[in-house]
Image: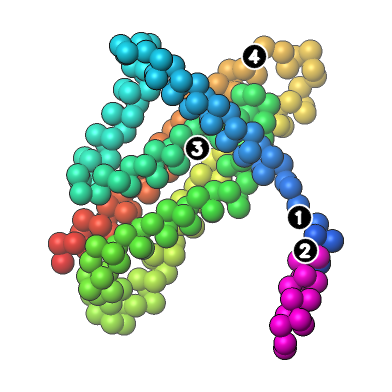
């Protein structure tokens, strides 16, 4: 295939994608909305902090949250692996907003399996890359423990990590959304005023915070096993 044909082939393939449609789903839209909200809040917090020489209410709150999470990362992974806190703080913050999207009338993006699996796969890549970078020999050796016949089982156990993380988060958020949807459908509109806020408070606020915390904790425990235990070998 000469250069002209390759160029035409590339153009035709790109045209086929456009003609076939690039689907913008509700999950995409709601994710972009949540990201926009987070960016605006971050810029407002930064502007507020930059304007004040002495810590104020919002600055104290932001610094408290960041310091608490930073200390938690150090206690979990150690000072040497403190840099992983940037990723996990971003994931934790996004999950809080995403899980609580129902409070502002949006379908939670984490009620979509593709979203939760994408997040868990990102964590999975970090776990594997981190384990290989800090101890290549121990990382490779771990797949053959206690002896080489366990290689298939060890591979399956590694692949089960992102699957379990994604399915757990997806199942919990989706079940809460389904319960609320059923209630709104079976209850007459004049009975659905006021009291469903209690359910939203539980499924969107409380459960959303808990699931974000669990996802982060489990991710940290998995990567801790790769970074700390494998370094000791």
Query: Label 1, on which residue?
Result: 22
Q: Quadrant of residue 197?
A: top right
Compared to 68, does 122 lie above or below? below
Query: Label 4, on which residue?
Result: 195
**Is residue 2 within the magenta segment?**
yes
Relative side of 79 to 98, left or right? left
- Depth-wise, is mark 1 or mark 4 nearer the camera? 1
- Depth-wise, is mark 2 or mark 4 nearer the camera? 2
Report, in whole angstroms, how far the alpha carbon at label 2 lies from the one at label 4: 47 Å
Report, in whole angstroms, how far the alpha carbon at label 2 lies from the one at label 3: 31 Å
Relative side of 72 to 17, left or right? left
- Depth-wise, is mark 4 or mark 3 nearer the camera? 3
Report, in whole angstroms, how far the alpha carbon at label 4 lies from the one at label 3: 26 Å
Where residue 109 sits: x, y (%)?
61, 40
Q: Could you tell me if the residues under marks 4 and 3 are in contact, i.e. CB atoms within 8 Å?
A: no
Relative side of 119 to 59, left or right? right
Where residue 101 sits: x, y (%)?
60, 30
Query: Is 166 or 59 nearer to us in this picture?
Result: 59
- The kind of secondary structure element at disc 2 is helix
Query: Label 3, on which residue?
Result: 95
- The kind of secondary structure element at disc 1 is loop
Q: Earlier in the sequence, mark 2 or mark 3?
A: 2
| Magenta part, dominant SS | helix
Report, in whole angstroms, how far the alpha carbon at label 2 lies from the one at label 1: 7 Å
Query: Label 2, on which residue?
Result: 17
Who's the residue at 33% across and 23% down the image?
Answer: 63
Q: Earlier in the sequence, mark 1 or mark 4?
A: 1
């Amino acid at each position: 295939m000469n250069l002209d044909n390759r160029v035409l082939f590339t153009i035709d393939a790109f045209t086929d994608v456009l003609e076939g449609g690039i689907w913008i789903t509700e999950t995409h839209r709601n994710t972009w909305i949540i990201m926009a909200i987070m960016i605006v809040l971050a810029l407002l917090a930064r502007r507020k902090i930059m304007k004040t020489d002495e810590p104020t209410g919002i600055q104290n709150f932001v610094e408290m949250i960041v310091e608490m999470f930073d200390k938690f990362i150090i206690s979990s992974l150690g000072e040497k692996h403190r840099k992983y806190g940037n990723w996990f703080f971003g994931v934790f913050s996004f999950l809080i907003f995403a899980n609580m999207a129902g409070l502002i009338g949006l379908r939670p993006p984490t009620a979509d399996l593709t979203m939760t699996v994408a997040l868990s796969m990102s964590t999975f890549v970090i776990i594997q890359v981190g384990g290989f970078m800090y101890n290549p020999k121990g990382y490779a050796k771990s797949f053959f423990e206690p002896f080489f016949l366990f290689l298939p089982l060890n591979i399956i156990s590694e692949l089960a990590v992102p699957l379990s993380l994604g399915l757990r988060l997806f199942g919990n958020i989706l079940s809460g959304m389904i319960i609320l949807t059923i209630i709104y459908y079976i209850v007459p509109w004049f009975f659905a005023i006021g009291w469903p806020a209690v359910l939203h408070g539980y499924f969107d606020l409380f459960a959303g915070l808990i699931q974000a915390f669990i996802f982060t904790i489990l991710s940290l425990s998995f990567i801790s096993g790769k970074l700390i235990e494998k370094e000791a070998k």
